[in-house]
Image: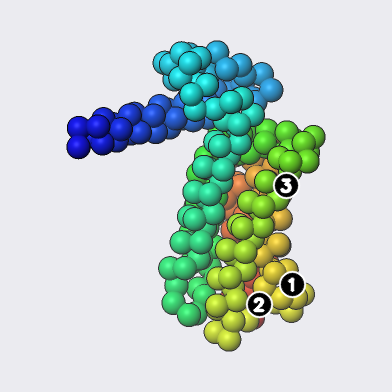
């Protein structure tokens, strides 16, 4: 039993070390950019040695990917939850409000995400992983829209729910690009709400 307790403590300590490294890396990546950060800087920010780093990650790329997946999966779950709060009927304006609040909470995340996108564009393996995440996010949106069909009709121009989900993600990408340049969170939130409402309704906030 004592050996098991020790093993559990070691496991918890290692998990905490990994979480601290990821949190520190997030702050450093957001401030300086992925390509300008060294392992030493991440360790210093977290208060750990290089040994602690290498006991959790083989490379800085591996840490970066783990960080991206952690944050991206969290956001995908938040979006799915925001869309699931209505019953069978989809209250489009209310859902748009909730999704917008989730997606635009953290400019630092957008900086890290953009770094990851540029990194992925030059590495096919990383690009495949990024595409997998984007597919899962799109599927979460499409699934919610599909379950609302029969209760809430989508504009015919979008085609099916897959087309609508792609339009939602594309609108988010466009608005957040502007947000990264002007840092105007209020304007970005307003624009995203208007775009999503126009895409998913007749433009007045009333599903067509």
Residue at horizontal 71%, vertical 62%?
Answer: 167
Residue at horizontal 55%, vertical 71%?
Answer: 144
Q: Which residue matches tag 1? A: 158
Residue 203 in view of the camera: no
Question: What percent of the width, then of the height, locates residue 31?
Answer: 57, 23
| Relative vertical location of residue 95 with respect to residue 124 in this rendering, above or below | below
Residue 128 is marked as 3
Q: What secondary structure is marked by label 3?
A: helix
Q: Which residue matches tag 2? A: 154
Residue nearest the viewer, comparing 132 with 31: 132
Q: Which is closer to the viewer, label 3 or label 1?
A: 3
| Relative vertical location of residue 145 with respect to residue 179 in this rendering, above or below | below
Labels 2 & 1 near each other (Cβ < 8 A):
yes
The CA span between labels 3 and 1 is 26 Å
Labels 2 & 3 near each other (Cβ < 8 A):
no
Question: What percent of the width, then of the height, locates residue 124?
Answer: 78, 41
């Amino acid at each position: 039993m004592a050996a098991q307790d020790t093993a559990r403590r070691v496991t918890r300590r290692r998990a905490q070390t990994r979480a601290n490294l990821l949190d520190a890396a997030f702050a450093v990546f957001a401030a300086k950019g992925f390509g300008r950060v060294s392992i030493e800087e991440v360790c210093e920010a977290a208060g750990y040695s290089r040994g602690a780093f290498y006991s959790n990650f083989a490379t800085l790329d591996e840490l970066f990917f783990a960080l991206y997946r952690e944050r991206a999966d969290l956001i995908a779950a938040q979006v799915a939850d925001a869309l699931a709060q209505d019953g069978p009927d989809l209250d489009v304006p209310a859902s748009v409000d909730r999704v917008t609040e989730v997606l635009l909470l953290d400019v630092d995340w957008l900086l890290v995400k953009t770094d990851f996108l540029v990194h992925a564009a030059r590495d096919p393996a990383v690009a495949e992983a990024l595409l997998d995440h984007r597919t899962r996010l799109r599927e979460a949106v499409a699934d919610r829209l599909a379950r609302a069909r029969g209760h809430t009709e989508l504009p015919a121009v979008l085609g099916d729910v897959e087309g609508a989900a792609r339009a939602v993600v594309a609108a988010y990408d466009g608005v957040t690009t502007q947000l990264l340049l002007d840092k105007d969170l209020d304007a970005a939130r307003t624009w995203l709400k208007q775009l999503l409402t126009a895409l998913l309704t007749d433009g007045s906030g009333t599903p067509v």
